[in-house]
Image (cartoon, rainbow, N blue to C red):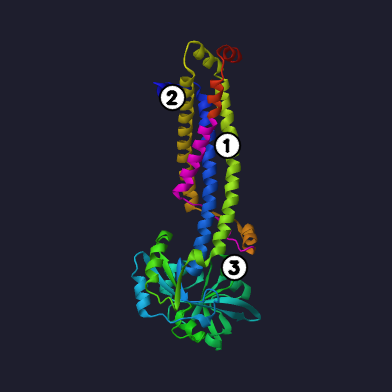
């Protein structure tokens, strides 16, 4: 009976009800979009860093992570590679040989990160073929390379030119060679695009005098939640006296710390938004209470108990909040889903300015369920907390004063 009465009450003043629903629903949509953009940026940062640089899990020689030199390379056994590939949820086992070299073309020179890789397996980690913006892929037996587009622009070279690499190889041997540029690649991290050279693994091992050696083995999984189980399985396969296995969180603590710090600022921004939303909702509930003082006074005068009036008003607020949250949820889902599949690309002049600071000029969004549910619950519970004012006002209400004030 009280529920039915509350439902009819909220539609007695349709204009007020619609305004309330729209304002709360808009708050849910706005907060959901803000949170989605924040979480999406974190996912993009992790994806760009993990999938390009380390993989979710990496195996390397003890001490390599503290001193990342070719002298800490190791020779993997076929048993280790096959064993890692056989662990459940492992999508690929990607070998890497990484070091630095001085790249030169004409009168231009620049320090570069040279990555020896197996093109077929590298596709699982960096999806390198889709990153090619000009030219063609390389094969495992080629003596050609892929270089970052930013590096090519700096060296003033293009596809078909020959790049000269000079560096120091394994145990101090001289490393020098000339390689045809087969294609240009571009990644989400500008600082990497500006200095990377991808070389087929046999050519890289010959260049550095590191025949059969790797600096690391990256393990690709279908989802980050599988990392702990894969770490456990991989740990059973390695000789812990010679090799170590690390997950991406251990290898990139700076990234995690940066995300946590930024997340705090994002939470503060959301709190400020919630305060604004809360004042708007409070104003609506205040108006709803003041408009009905005469009605409440009459009900008290004819003998209706206060707690019943309070319960009806509370049910009205719950119904309004629930409808508003559901509307906001329904509106935010298609908007965020569209933004997820169509990230906002910043135009040229902004792109250049962002990339100077090593930031990808794109706004991406997340469709994690928590984006929708957390905002909806927060707004809903805010409405319930703000309902304390009408409850208190009714509890202190005097029938004669209420009828006089509500005229």
Q: Tag 2 or tag 3, which sits nearer the N-term? A: 2
Expressed as whole percent of the image width and height from the top left, the position of residue 50 reads: 49, 65
Please indicate, yes or no, whether residue 10 appears anywhere in the rendered image: no
Q: Secondary structure at mark 3?
A: helix
Q: Nearer the viewer, mark 3 or mark 1?
A: 1
Q: Nearer the viewer, mark 3 or mark 2?
A: 2
Q: Nearer the viewer, residue 372 or 232?
A: 232
Above or below residue 372? Residue 176 is below
Toward which corner of the image does residue 108 lie, by quadrant?
bottom right
Magenta-colored stretch includes residue 133: no
Question: Label 3: which residue?
Answer: 191
Please report the bounds of the magenta region as a residue range: 357-386
Expressed as whole percent of the image width and height from the top left, the position of residue 247 reads: 46, 66
Expressed as whole percent of the image width and height from the top left, the position of residue 124 reads: 42, 68
Magenta-colored stretch includes residue 364: yes
Question: Label 1: which residue?
Answer: 277
Query: Mainly helix, strand or loop, the magenta region?
Result: helix
Q: Nearer the viewer, residue 22 or 391?
A: 391
Q: Tag 1 or tag 3, which sits nearer the N-term? A: 3
Toward which corner of the image does residue 93 lie, by quadrant?
bottom left
Residue under the point 49% across and 61% down: 47
Q: Nearer the viewer, residue 57 or 237?
A: 237
Question: Label 2: which residue?
Answer: 7
Between the residue at mark 3 and the residue at mark 1, the CA separation in whole angstroms equals: 40 Å
């Amino acid at each position: 009976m009280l529920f039915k009465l509350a439902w009819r009450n909220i539609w007695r003043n349709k204009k007020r009800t619609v305004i309330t629903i729209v304002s709360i629903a808009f708050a849910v949509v706005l907060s959901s979009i803000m949170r989605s953009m924040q979480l999406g940026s974190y996912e993009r940062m992790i994806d760009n860093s993990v999938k390009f640089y380390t993989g979710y899990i990496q195996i390397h020689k003890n001490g390599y992570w503290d001193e990342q030199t070719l002298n800490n390379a190791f020779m993997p056994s076929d048993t280790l590679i096959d064993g890692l590939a056989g662990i459940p949820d492992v999508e690929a086992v990607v070998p890497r040989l990484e070091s630095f070299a001085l790249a030169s073309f004409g009168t231009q020179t620049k320090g570069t990160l040279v990555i020896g890789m197996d093109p077929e397996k590298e596709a699982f980690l960096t999806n390198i073929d889709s990153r090619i913006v000009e030219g063609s892929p390389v094969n495992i037996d080629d003596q050609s390379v892929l270089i970052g587009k930013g590096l090519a622009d700096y060296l003033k070279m293009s596809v078909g030119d020959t790049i000269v690499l000079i560096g120091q190889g394994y145990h101090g041997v001289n490393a020098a060679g000339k390689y045809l540029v087969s294609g240009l690649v571009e990644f989400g991290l500008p600082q990497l695009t500006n200095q990377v050279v991808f070389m087929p693994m046999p050519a890289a091992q010959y260049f550095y005098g590191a025949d059969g050696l790797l600096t690391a083995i990256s393990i690709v999984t279908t989802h980050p939640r599988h990392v702990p189980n894969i770490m456990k399985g991989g740990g059973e396969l390695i000789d812990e006296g010679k090799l170590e296995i690390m997950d991406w969180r251990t290898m990139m603590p700076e990234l995690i710390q940066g995300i946590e710090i930024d997340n705090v600022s994002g939470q503060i921004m959301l709190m400020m938004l919630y305060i604004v939303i809360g004042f708007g909702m409070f104003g609506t509930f205040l108006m709803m209470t003041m408009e009905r003082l005469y009605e409440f006074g009459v009900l008290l005068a004819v003998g209706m108990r206060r707690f019943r009036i309070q319960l009806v008003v509370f049910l009205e607020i719950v119904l309004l909040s629930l409808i508003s949250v559901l509307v906001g949820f329904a509106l935010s889902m298609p908007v965020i889903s569209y933004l997820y599949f169509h990230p906002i690309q910043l135009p040229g002049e902004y792109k250049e300015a962002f990339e100077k600071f090593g930031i990808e000029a794109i706004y991406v969004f997340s469709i994690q369920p928590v984006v929708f549910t957390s905002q909806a619950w927060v707004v809903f519970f805010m409405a319930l907390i703000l309902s304390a004012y009408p409850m208190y006002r009714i509890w202190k209400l005097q029938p004669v004063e209420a009828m006089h004030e509500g005229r």
